[in-house]
Image (cartoon, rainbow, N blue to C red):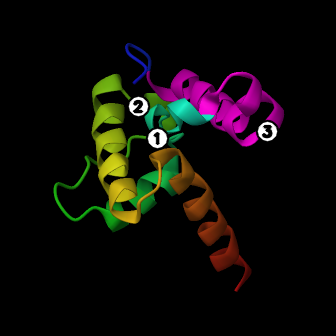
Amino acid sequence: MIVGIGGIARKVLNIFLRDALYTKYLSDAFNLSQAEYLFEIPLDSIVAKGIVKNSEAVQPPRWPGVKYLKPEQSHIYQSAAHKIAEQRLIARVHLDALWWSFERDSAMV
């Protein structure tokens, strides 16, 4: 977990880490697959909607927008994403790709 930052800086760092994981050369060179389950999901409105829609237990707070996201709120969303990912037997970082592609494909219909 990234401590002390929220909002846009946290999202950019999570995107960087996810993309490094998805790049074979970087992933192999730095053994990123060992940290895969520690990576956070980059939070934005599409991901927040996916988390809210798929959360069975406690619902996360109202989405404030990535610019206004506080570390405490981020933690709640990350914890919910972690639970969803565990049920699907994947790392939470991969939920981003699922929900973004679903959102894109839904818009094409």
- On screen, residue 57 above or below 28: below
Q: Residue farthest to the bottom?
A: 109
Point out the image quarter for the C terminus: bottom right
Q: Looking at the image, tell me whether mark 2 or mark 3 is earlier in sequence order.
A: 3
Number of numbered discs present?
3
Q: Quadrant of residue 97?
A: bottom right
- Quadrant assignment, res 5: top left
Mark 3 sits on what residue?
A: 24
Alpha-carbon distance for marks 2 and 1? 6 Å
Residue 96 located left or right of residue 81: right
Q: Are marks 2 and 3 in contact (CB under 8 Å)?
A: no
Instruction: Give the magenta part as a residue range.
Output: 6-32
Residue at x 40% of width, y 31% of height: 69
Residue 65's tag is 1
Q: Quadrant of the N terminus?
A: top left
Which is in the foreground here, disc 1 or disc 3? 3
Read off the residue under disc 2.
69
- Residue at 49%, 53% (x, y): give it: 47
**In this orientation, which residue lies closer to the viewer: 16 or 67?**
16
